[in-house]
Each structure stands twice: as structure tokens, then as C-alpha cells.
Image: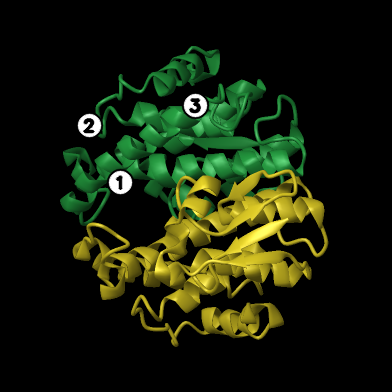
Chain colours: A green, B yellow
Amino acid sequence: MKLYDGGRAPNPRRVNVFLAEKGIEVERVPVDMGQLGHKSAEVTELNPLQRLPVLVLDDGTALSESVAICRYLEELHPEPRLMGGDAKDKAIVEMWNRRMEHHFLAAVANAFRHTHPAMKDWEVPQVAEWGEINRPKAVAFLEMMDQELANHEFIAGDRYTIADITGMIAFDFMKPARIDRPEHLTNVMRWYRAVSARPSAQA
Amino acid sequence: MKLYDGGRAPNPRRVNVFLAEKGIEVERVPVDMGQLGHKSAEVTELNPLQRLPVLVLDDGTALSESVAICRYLEELHPEPRLMGGDAKDKAIVEMWNRRMEHHFLAAVANAFRHTHPAMKDWEVPQVAEWGEINRPKAVAFLEMMDQELANHEFIAGDRYTIADITGMIAFDFMKPARIDRPEHLTNVMRWYRAVSARPSAQA
């Protein structure tokens, strides 16, 4: 299989951290998103929505959507489990991963895409007001998370999962989105330091 | 187990259609979202994000996020499969379900929440410009889907899956969001008529 990789952009990085945690090596096709490489004819053929990453299987099947790619890798290489074990555990991990996506990563991404000058040819039209109101949404979610993380070590409980990957990447993405780190949220900061110290965070 | 149910609102309905397709009966606690029942102390205790539905398991675990609830039900009651069989099939269904969520349901929901007068106490503040630009986004996605549905009967291939549930519910939600039905997209309309004719669509 072959990974069309967009590097450190949030979604490509989610899959790269997931691969690093699993210890899986894959052949990579680097795509320069700064040069709009994800809108090339080659990528469009693989994903009509022109998003990265895309994992192309040996039979030619093109998988896109980061979490769908992770699902495939988790099924093929179950250990270490990053998406839960039994029915209840899988559902809890999926719940937390989706909470991190819908209430944190999406808010940070909206702030970035709708207010950052570098995004003006990517997000057409930018709606500055929409971008601005997403900053306090992201912070409000982290305030809720701070209470949750008083009771469990990681996002979805007491072991590292895909929900921590989504959360770490959203947290790092706050910098270009110009959202201040909430240094006063001690449980969130403790969690962030722990997940960032893992070797996979370099991906 | 016990389902805190929000009725015909899009996310509660996704789980209700899923249950109907599986033929699973569950005890229901109806919550009147029109009366903001999802913001009650009882629901907030189960889901700090105050969203429905919530499935409470016999051990007291509260699962929220519609697709996480569906994941739990699929694991417990695998047949009929609505989330894929082997690794590749699961990933393809997840890819399509996420495409339907991120590029269709989200666009329709944004149009509804940010432009409909009835939503002014729900979505604070409403950003009318953001709502407006989501209408053509939803239609552009359906134009892409029309080409896809020339080649397969259902959204994720040749069998009905959770991606069809998400798509049908987003399609029905276009009416309150004031997005015209794309009658000229013959493949989309053929698909919509087929999924809507299933008994589960009454849920």
C-alpha cells in the first residue's frame, strides 16, 4: 500500500501519528499542499473531494478520510489497540474521538481557515465573524475537558487512543489559529505534555 | 439499556433508523428538544455537551455521539451489517459515512442553524453569511454524488449501510434548511426514493 501524504497538516498528521504508534512503515508519496498538490489530477482521481491523506491499497482501492484509514490499519494490525477492544470500549473511544473532532479540532480549523490571511485562496469566501466565534468555542471545550481529565489520564480513559491523537493535533493547531494555550487548565496541560512527549508526536 | 431519544431531529433519527434496520427494540426516554429538554440537569449529567441521543447501558455507562452508539449496536448485533464486514469494507463504509457527514449533513445543518429564525436561541450568535454559503456547498456535494451513484446503487457500494442513513437524513433536512431538492440529479433522486421507501425511513 501507498500513502499520499500531506505532511504536518492536521489530517495527514493524524494518520502519521497513528502509524508511528502502531510501528507500521508504509511507502509514502509526499504531496506539497502549500503548492496545492492535493488539487492535482492524480489526487483528484483518488479522492474527488481533493483532501489528503489517501491510502491506496494494493488492489487499487483508494481510502480517504483519516479515521477511515486508521480503521483499516487498526483492523489489520490490532496491537497496540488505539480504537478500543470490546463493543463498549470501541464505542467509548469513538465517542471521545468524535467529541474531539466536532467540538475542538473543527473549532480550531474554522478559526484558522476563516481568519488566517494564508487561507484566503483555500477557504472561499472566508467569513471572519464565523472564524472569530470559533476561538472561544475551542477554549470552552477545553474547560470542559479539564474537568474530565481530573478523572482520567487520557481523553477516552486510562489508556492512549486515537482520541488523544486528534486532541494533540488540534491543540498544536491552536498556534496558527491564534488561540492562546490555556496554561491555567492544569489537567489539560498535564495531558498535553504527556502525549507530546511520546515519540509518535514527532510525526 | 435505555435510549434518551430526541425524536425526528437529525442525530436522534440516525440512531432510530439504524435500530429499525437492525430490528432492535430498546426502552426509550423521550426528550422534548423543542422545550430544550436536552439541556436539563438529567441529560447534562449523561452528556456534558448536552446533545442527544444518549444510550445508557445497564452498567450505567452513558454513550453519546450517534455513530458511537451505532458502533456499539453493530458490535452487539452484527447482522444485518450496516458498518462493513472485513477491514477494507469497514474502512470504505466509514469513508463514505464521514463524507456524508462532513460535506453534506454539516452543510445542511449549518444552513439551518445559522439562517432559520427558530434557531436563534440555539445557535448563538447566528452568522447568516456562513449559513448562506453552506447551501451551495450542499448542492455541489450532491452533484459529485450524482456521478458516484451512476456507478453504485447505494452510497458506499452495492448494499445499504449507515452512509445511506446519514445521507437520507441530511436530504430530508434540506427542507427546513430551505435548500431545493435537486430534481435534475437523476441518480441522487433514484437513490433517495429507494432509501426512503424502506420501512426504516419512517423512524
Amino acid, disc 3: Leu
**Whole-percent x and y of residue B43?**
51, 53
Judged left or right of residue A154, residue A134 is left
Label 1 lies in what chain? A
Task: Identify the mark nearer the N-term, 2 or 3.
Answer: 3
Are tags 3 and 1 found on a single chain? yes
Q: Which of B202 and A58 is in front in this view?
A: B202
Amino acid, disc 1: Asn
Badge 3, how many Cα within 10 Å: few under 14, some, many 20+? many
- Disc 3, SS: loop
Spatial CA span between label 2 and label 1: 12 Å
Depth check, mark 2 against mark 3: the one in front is 3
Spatial CA span between label 2 and label 3: 24 Å
Judged left or right of residue B179, residue B105 is right
- Disc 1, SS: helix
Task: Identify the mark nearer the N-term, 2 or 1.
Answer: 1
- Residue on which disc 3 sits: A149
Q: Nearer the viewer, residue B11 or B46?
A: B46
- Residue on which disc 1 sits: A110
Label 3 lies in what chain? A
**Residue at 38% across / 72% down in the picture?**
B139
Are tags 2 and 1 found on a single chain? yes
**Whole-percent x and y of residue A187?**
43, 21
Label 2 lies in what chain? A
- Residue on which disc 2 sits: A178
Amino acid, disc 2: Arg
